[in-house]
Each structure stands twice: as structure tokens, then as C-alpha cells.
Amino acid sequence: VQLQASGGGLVQAGESLTLECAAPGIRFINNVMAWYRQTPGKQRELVATITTGGSPRYADFVKGRFTISRDNAKATAYLTMNNLQPEDTGVYYCNARRGTANTWGQGTLVTVSS
């Protein structure tokens, strides 16, 4: 397994979760890491990315609430999600990109109750 996503679960609105993406099967330090999500009835969408140098970018709908980070020594990327809302419910996928090579994790389910 190249990417292993974990950390999803059931929370109430306003609570927090941190997702982890372990990447034992890739050369982590050379990959741009990203989190995507697929919410009910919608296509998969980009949530956040972090470059090999650690620069983050966010989708407008999560700015100020979510933080993406990476630990190159542990070959792990994180997505810390604060003030979760019911519309954040969905399956969250981690992605690693190096040039034209794209690697996906299996997804982790986040459910936010109101």
C-alpha cells in the first residue's frame, strides 16, 4: 500500500478531526501532497495541497478552518479540520503527485452531525 489515510470518524458540528496520510510506498519528500473529498451528491473536489517545500494552499470553502501539513521524516501528511460542519461530511482522500505520477489513498469517512 502506497498511501494509507486514517483519522476519519463521527463528530458533532463545531468539533475537530485530524486526518493522517501515511506514505510508506512512495518517495514522500519529492511529492506534492493533497487532500480531496467527495461529499454526497458531488464530484471529488480539492481541499488543500502542500508543496514539497511546505507551502499550503486551500479551497475557499475551508480557508481558516482546515490546515494541511507534512512531516517528511515520518512520510506523513495531515489535515487538521476545525469547526467542522455537516456540509463537510464525505470521504476524504489523500493524494501524492510527482510530475505526471498520481497516487491515491483509499479514503477515510468523515461524518459531521448537526
Image (cartoon, helix red, strand yellow):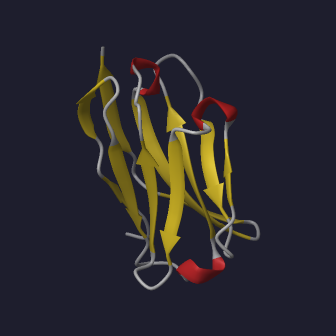
Seen at 68% across and 33% down, the residue is 60
Quarter containing the N terminus: bottom left
Say above or below: 1 vs 17.
below
Q: Percent from the top left, x then y, of residue 43?
A: 60, 27
For residue 91, what is the image quadrant?
top left
Q: Percent from the top left, x then y, of residue 16?
A: 33, 39
Q: Percent from the top left, x then y, of residue 50?
A: 64, 62
Seen at 37% across and 59% down, the residue is 20
Seen at 50% across and 81% down, the residue is 72
Q: Percent from the top left, x then y, of residue 26?
A: 51, 78
Say above or below: 25 vs 86.
below
Q: Is residue 54 left or right of residue 3?
A: right
Return the residue nearer the eye: 106 or 53. 53
Quarter containing the C terminus: top left
Seen at 39% across and 19% down, the residue is 86
Residue placed furthest toward the right: 99
Q: Is residue 14 left or right of residue 93?
A: left
Q: How many marks?
A: 0
Return the residue nearer the eye: 85 or 52. 85
Say above or below: 78 vs 73.
above
Say above or below: 10 vs 74.
above
Q: Is residue 24 left or right of residue 9?
A: right
